[in-house]
Amino acid sequence: MLSKHRVDIVAVTKVAHGDPKFAEIMNLAGIEWLGDSRIQNIVRMRRKGVDKRILQIRSPQISEIALSVKHADAALITELEIAKRIASQSKRADKKFGVIVMVELGDLREGLMPDEVVPFVREISNYYLDFLGIGTNLGCYGGVLPTIDKINVLLSLRDNLIDSGIDVPVVSGGATDTLSLIEEGRVTGINQLRIGEAIILGRDTTGNRNIPYLNKDTMLLEAEIIEIKEKASKPYGEIGRDSFGNIPVIDDLGTRKRAIIALGKQDVDLGHLVPLDPDVKILGGSSDHIILDIHESEIDYKVGSVVQFLPRYPSVLKLMGSPYVKRVYIP
Ligand SMILES: *Cc1c(COP(=O)(O)O)cnc(C)c1O
């Protein structure tokens, strides 16, 4: 879909914690660029022999610039000090490093204010760097949606730069949340998107939609039942706080059949887990236990049975980082 609109994909591996297997699959799919925010993930991919170009999608820290220049090919930047340090490290390593200058368009995470962009790029064009272009990121902190107005700000900055004699090969127009604008053919001029969630889950959380032409069942979580009992639904006794400091408010639905699975808040985000059995409800949990209401289910669960879930983005992020969760790849 994107190549039809002449948009390159940076396949973002961060939700998979830079899993080299993911990188390998992207390679087979013909992807040219990978993106990750963490230098540790990038280094791990390199050690596993991943030789694609890698864009570091969070600004390098000053303390890790030598590693970034060594293992990545380019980074998103917003600070002159970082640009200077990258340039001097690039010179030392004799490796010209690419930078994409990020522009703040309302989401209020990283980025220069639009009126600072031209002077900033003018300044860094004197440095030993490869200025690749400009980019933006929306939908992360402020939940701000990419709209044509926002993209137009980016495109007019590109034009200003070109007018002042600076080449702008890349306009990196966003992430999964920007796909819908491209699909509808409503924007032209963006030529790169940095895509994680759409590839891994076929979903767009910011736009709150399942992407119709992508697979949604790419990741499956299985957890084993360690207890099944009929219990009251409302906790009894004097109520303080739960193990995360919250005061629980739990309705009384009478006695219910419940199951506990051997998984907890350190492995998943309970609000972002969809049981495949539609009659299973997630009641809550703590660090190592998740409690399910299985009262209405037609499946005859037993201790040792496996319950399946589709994990959404925040859960995938935790699951892929949890050393307690075994990964099985199904070709
Ligand atoms: C995480 C991230 C992406 C990828 O976002 P998805 O919503 O997973 O596509 C792209 N760019 C930046 C800067 C990011 O931090």
Image (tube, rainbow, N blue to C red):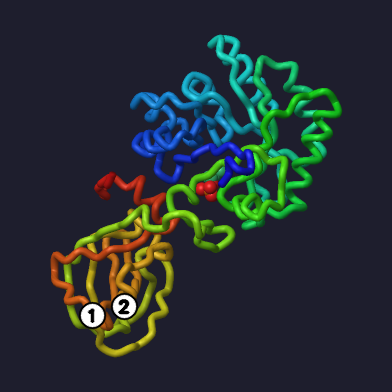
Compared to residue 161, the image places residue 313 above or below, namely below
Q: Residue furthest right?
A: 163
**In the foreground, 73 or 270:** 73
**Residue at (36, 45) in percent of width and height:** 321
Q: Is residue 235 left or right of residue 36?
A: left
Look at mark 1 in the image and give the residue it sits on.
Answer: 298
Q: Quadrant of residue 153?
A: top right
Q: Amino acid at mark 1?
A: Glu
Q: Quadrant of residue 215?
A: bottom left
Circle 1 sits in a helix, a strand or a loop, which is it?
Answer: loop
**Residue at (33, 81) in percent of width and height:** 238
Q: Residue furthest left?
A: 303
Compared to residue 320, the image places residue 277 above or below, namely below
Give the image location of residue 317, x and y in percent: 41, 50
Compared to residue 289, the image places residue 229 above or below, namely below
Circle 2 sits in a helix, a strand or a loop, which is it?
Answer: loop
Q: Residues within 10 Å of mark 2 (few under 14, many from 20)?
A: few
Between discs 1 and 2, the one toward the N terminus: 2
Q: Residues within 10 Å of mark 1 (few under 14, many from 20)?
A: few
| Distance (Cα) linking label 1 and label 2 | 8 Å
Q: Is residue 139 visible?
A: no
- Image quadrant of ligand 1 equals top right
The quarter of the image holding the C terminus is top left
**In the foreground, 81 or 191:** 191
Look at mark 2 in the image and give the residue it sits on.
Answer: 279
**Residue at (50, 60) in percent of width and height:** 212
Compared to residue 202, the image places residue 299 above or below, namely below
Give the image location of residue 117, x and y in percent: 77, 34
